[in-house]
Amino acid sequence: MLQLLLPFQILFIPGLILLLLWSVYRTVIKKDYAVGLVLYLGLVIIVDSFLNTGIYIPGLDQGSIKYSEIVACFLIASNAKVWTQKRSGGAVIVFVFLYFLLMAVSSLRGYTLWDGVYSYRRYLLPQILAFLLAYRGLDSKEDHGAAVFLFLTLLIIISLVTFWDVFFDRSLLKSDMLFKPEYWHNRKVGRFGSFFLNPNHMATFAVLVFPVVFLWTLRETEFWKRIYCWASLLALSFALIETKSRGPLLGFTVAFIFLISVPTGGFSFIRKAGYTMLFLSVLYLFMPGFFDHATERFETIGSEATEDSISRSSIWPFTQKIISEYPLLGIGLGEKQYIEYMERFGFREEYGSMPLDNPHNSYLQIAVHAGIPALFAYILLNGALIKKGISFIFKYRGSRSSLYVTGLLAGIVGFLTCITVDMQLFTENVASVYWAAAGLLSSMIYSENTLEQT
């Protein structure tokens, strides 16, 4: 029966182009800022990261102007007055500024100056823009229907790429990035990462966005819109399950415990738990045995620890040793710099092999590249977000905004869990979505005029 879907593959690229043109029209002509923000994230994920393309600058092999940056510049230039009227983001803004400043200092001390600056420009600049664009906030007190439609469609597109890969052994969109080991090696063992290539990154993206979309779906009253919301959630769940990612599945569990436990007006603990069980039941109808399929890799943890000497258990102690030697400013930014110092500290001599190119723990990665002060700045900004966000939820418990804050916070809590075992914070795609969530959350909890407090 699935073979009947194959002829529809020809519609994917034309549909993607039409959706892009519609998004640009809404952003540029209709001045729909919310659509522009989603467009920015979509370009980062699909065009900048997966297609790895842009407007190339002659003479620079690794230099280009990203299409997402063009959208970001337009949004910033056309909304300059709004930023001047923004209320202070309190401690969050201070820690965000300090974190990115320390990372910038780190970039000047990379393997080479060019390598460090390039790493900052490739991975951290999209994150800065995502936070800045989201922190500007949303104007209307009404639902941003076009932006929600675009975001849900983006989730379905991401999931369709996984669907086609799993069942038809085809890629809906060609890219040179498909030849990278993080795609083909994981695909060979039955793990799929869609546009993110790395299954762990795809799964972490799902953890980030699922809670707020779930709560939006519960709040939606129009029948066809609710159906579309449920379809996007089911599609995203399928993509998450096919990653078979252990860390993100634990992060997803933490996120949902937070989501269900935090009181929200109109959605009691019992009601949220009930809807969760209903969703799991529907998912089981579409994917019988999904739980065993998603968690099968948990059974291999013990064997991997004994068979593979180059793993987190061997990388983390060496990384901590480097941090203890360079605690203030770290060793400098870049994968080449990290490998150089791991070699210098004797990793090859002890294990007889090159180290991994990053610590596979974002917290350790911050500290080793930029120092413990940068790590404290990152932890404190998230602590301030969570503390202020929970206070906001209790203060406006009956409001629509508190529901969105709950969803955003749950996703961020899940993300912070995921990055304890991987480097998602040092990616241009997943990390940009996280910083957009953090920026939007900051805008909501520090401003009274961004969304309706009813």
Image: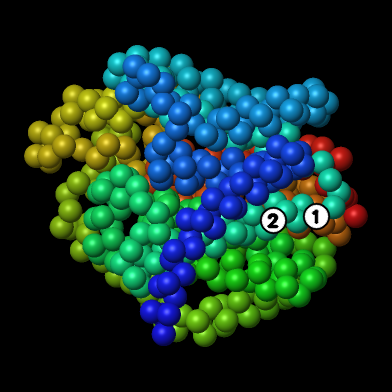
Quarter of the N terminus within the rendering: bottom left
Residue 436: name its quadrant. top right
Question: In the image, is 412 to the left or to the right of 123?
Answer: right
Please indicate, yes or no, whether residue 237 appears anywhere in the rendered image. Answer: yes
Residue type at mark 2 is Val
Seen from the viewer's position, the closer of residues 366 and 186 is 186
Q: Earlier in the sequence, mark 2 or mark 1?
A: 1
> In the rendering, which numbered label is found on residue 143?
1
Q: Residue 244 location, x and y as percent?
A: 37, 65
Q: Are marks 2 and 1 in contact (CB under 8 Å)?
A: yes
Whether residue 379 is visible, yes or no, is no
Q: How is the image coloured?
A: rainbow
Q: Which three-letter amino acid code belongs to the residue tagged 1?
A: Asp
Up/down of 280 relative to 419, above or below: below
Please identify the quarter of the rendering in which residue 166 is found.
bottom left
Residue 330 image offset from top left, x and y in percent: 38, 22
Q: Which mark is residue 148?
A: 2
User: Label 1's element?
Assistant: loop
* Residue 115 image point, x, y percent: 33, 21
Report the front residue among 67 and 423.
67
Residue at the image position 39 percent from the left and 39 percent from the top: 52
